[in-house]
Image (cartoon, helix red, strand yellow):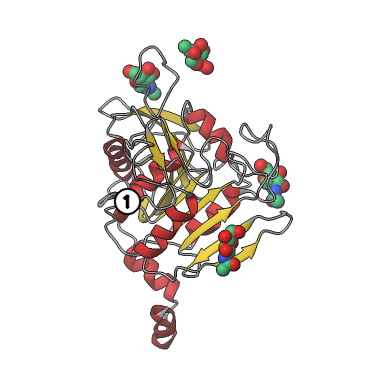
Amino acid sequence: MHRNLVAPLLGISSFGAAHTLRQRSAAGCGQSPTATLGELSKFNTTAGREYGVWLPDDYDQTAATPLIVSYHGADGTIDSQAALDKLTHSEFNTDHIVVYLQGKADDPDEPNHTTWEGAPGNDEDDVGFTSDVLDAMTAGYCIDTSRIYATGKSQGGGFVGRLACDADMSKRIAAFAPVSGAYYIGSIDEKSETKPETVQVPCEAGRADVPIMAFHGGDDTTIAYYGAFRSGSCLPAIPNWIQQWAARDDLDETPANTSISGSDNGVVMSFGDGLVTLVYDGDDIGHDWPSTTENSDNGGTGLAAFNASTMIMAFFREHTLS
Ligand SMILES: *[C@@H]1O[C@H](CO)[C@@H](O)[C@H](O)[C@H]1NC(C)=O
Ligand SMILES: *[C@@H]1O[C@H](CO)[C@@H](O)[C@H](O)[C@H]1NC(C)=O
Ligand SMILES: *[C@@H]1O[C@H](CO)[C@@H](O)[C@H](O)[C@H]1NC(C)=O
Ligand SMILES: *[C@@H]1O[C@H](CO)[C@@H](O)[C@H](O)[C@H]1NC(C)=O
């Protein structure tokens, strides 16, 4: 706010000035890219974890480029998530690098049951994996390190919430957009005093203005909007979860509501001019990546009145790390 008021007096564009100051020259600037432009290329970290890298068609190795990290849901893969979020499609994104991380299957008897740290039964260090991938990306590509973003579906969305609450990752990632997130909170007995409506989310965010845009459907029968006990853990009610973000970011607790056009009762709840936003997809939307066209999620439960990926890209564009 203040910067916008003062910058014109100095005769400079606040956007341009901020951009110049903030752009950190990543070590990878100037290097020929290892990944193929416009295709999803797969790599392993030195610790043997797999990830896919998509570079825009006109990626320029001398221009600092923003990057999105995207996480699949339980049982998902790099490819299934790319098919779901469509962030490698020109309709949604032409100028951000997108990196898809592959979750691990811990049980050798269920090789396709891939999960993320924080989900019941997972004991991987996926925060460390994310950090390794960001290190590899900034070493090998020209990344604008002030514009690194995270999104994900279901358990992947829950993990995005975890990154936002991590002391270091919350300072490395500029904005977070979980979709139908499964925000598992430890191992909690259903018979305990804990309730999804009031359970406290453990959080060590390293800054006080973390941008969050979460999506959730009213007809989500996998990760219920009003919370639940599941797999020996507690899933917070989504209104409770988002209120805690508004409080952490020191925002007014009452959101400004805007109805979603074309939807019967979808509502965008905006705290602090959208720094924290909950998109209630609508009563009839299930455990989905909201889309107006059919995708691998919504075939059985109906189409949304909007594309989540469009809103996510607009939200990311509004946020840069200072
Ligand atoms: C990554 O490592 C796994 C397991 O070692 C292997 O199956 C996979 O093919 C590797 N991927 C790449 C792109 O090298
Ligand atoms: C795991 O997924 C692969 C690829 O879709 C499939 O070929 C394989 O049969 C699956 N394995 C099990 C145990 O379901
Ligand atoms: C905003 O919308 C939510 C969901 O419909 C509702 O619970 C809440 O009361 C609304 N808040 C205001 C201030 O209208
Ligand atoms: C949503 O995205 C699909 C492509 O995935 C596109 O066909 C459709 O027109 C988009 N809907 C809106 C409202 O933009």
Q: Quadrant of the N terminus?
A: bottom left
Report if residue 94 is visible in the image. no
Q: Quadrant of residue 5?
A: bottom left
Q: Quadrant of the C terminus?
A: bottom left
Q: Tell me: 292 left or right of 222.
A: right
In the image, residue 320 lies at what x, y percent? 40, 62
- In front: 303, or 99? 303
Q: Does label 1 point to a residue whose CB lies under 8 Å from ligand 3?
A: no
Q: Is residue 240 above or below residue 223?
A: below
In the image, residue 132 lies at what x, y percent? 28, 38
Specify the amino acid type for callout 1. Cys
Residue closest to the far bottom: 9
Report if residue 38 is visible in the image. yes
Question: Residue shown at 52%/43% (left/top)?
Answer: 180
Q: Is residue 112 above or below residue 205?
A: above
In the image, residue 190 lies at what x, y percent? 39, 36
Number of numbered labels in the structure image: 1
Label 1 packing within 10 angstroms: few (<14), some (14-19), many (20+): many
Residue closest to the far top: 109
Q: Is residue 128 above or below residue 281?
A: above
- In front: 285, or 150? 285
Question: Residue shown at 36%/31% (left/top)?
Answer: 120
Q: Quadrant of ligand 3?
A: bottom right
Does dot 1 land on a helix, a strand or a loop?
Answer: loop
Q: Which residue is mark 1?
A: 165
Q: Tell me: 10 left or right of 154.
A: left
In the image, residue 107 lies at what x, y percent? 35, 17
- In front: 111, or 236? 236
